[in-house]
Amino acid sequence: MQPTQQVSIPELIQQVPLNYYLIVSTALFVIGIIGVLTRRNAIIIFMSIELMLNAVNLLLIAFSSYRSDSAGQVFVFFIMAVAAAEVAVGLAIIVMIYRNIRSIDVGLLNKLKW
Amino acid sequence: MLNLIFYAFAALTLGGSLAVLITRNVMYSAFFLLLSLIGVAALFVLASADLLAVAQVMIYVGGVLVLVIFGVMLTHKPKPETTTGPQAARPNYILTQHRAWLWPLLVAAGLFTAFYSLISRIHFSLFEHRAPFQTSVDTIGKQLMTEYIIPFEIAGILLLAALVGATYLSSQGDRTNNQ
């Protein structure tokens, strides 16, 4: 691998250090964790899970473009497909829970607690 | 200049995701999620992943966010009997209980330092020299159709199963309501 001769996009990525992407994606992941741990609305917990998936995608893309290896981007493609499936099924489950107990507060779903 | 653009979009992403947590209105948090997802798409562009930025806008903003907004609207209580006072007048107001903030914040701060120190301690020697960039559309298409053809097909089957399952769950709710 020799240093790049291209003009537009490699210079784009060269000017932003990899550490910045690490900080941003780690902060996004941690914000998602705070959301899952603190909020009780099931839909907001769902959105926080989406934020965590996006953080992982961002880290994968940063690494793959710094290596000029597009295998990481293929992984991100599969993660997006699985996330779309997860959203469809998860929202159907949340709507079913709302129809049954008329609430989506996860603190009320304690029937399976030991 | 480019660093400034990166800072702006990173601030958009992190601020949007923080606002998702902070706001009390579920509909507002869905729109802040939109802001955050668009910021992530812009960061994809800055990381020279053009195809995935378009896919992010199409899948997340076009599909996931619309589904989330439908979920917010379907779980909205039409008559909030339990809420009284000025809060009942707000649209889309869903009452939820509070949780403790201290332990999740401590856990999150610990995880941030742990993840960041772990990831940044890895020494990648390859990252010093970068190969010339080819546009990611060609290479991703070729890799999807040759190297990763079996995960590609499995993802198709997974999507079909998820669609059938979501349809079954929703239609079963309708049937039990009609009885």
Image: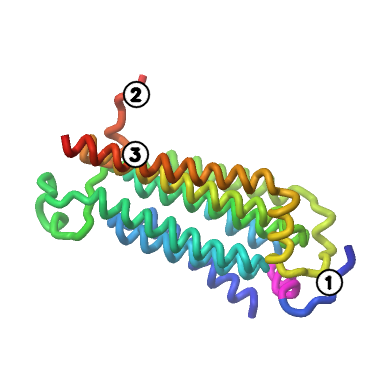
**Residue in view at x 29 percent, y 37 percent:** B172
Q: Residue at x 72, y 65 (%)?
A: B138
* Residue B167 location, quadrant: top left
Provide residue B175's location: percent of width, then percent of height: 23, 37
- Decide if residue A31 is in sight here: no
Q: Which contiguous range is marked in magenta? A: A9-16
Residue type at mark 3? Leu
Q: Which residue is mark 2?
A: A112
Residue nearest the viewer, comparing B153 with B136: B153
Q: Are marks 3 and 1 on the same chain?
A: no
> How far apart are labels 3 and 2 at the CA level?
21 Å
Q: Nearer the viewer, mark 3 or mark 2?
A: 3
Q: In the rendered structure, does residue B109 fall within the stretch colored magenta?
A: no
Image quadrant where one finds the C terminus of chain A = top left
Query: Which of the numbered marks, if any, corresponds to residue A82?
Result: none
Q: Percent position (x, y) of residue B105?
A: 45, 45
Residue annotated with mark 1: A4
| Residue indicated by mark 3 | B169
Residue at 60% across, 54% down: A57
Magenta segment, prevailing SS (helix, strand or loop)? helix
| Residue A11 in magenta stretch | yes
Q: Is residue B57 left or right of residue A4?
A: left
Asked if residue B11 is positioned above or below residue A76 in the image, the reply reads below
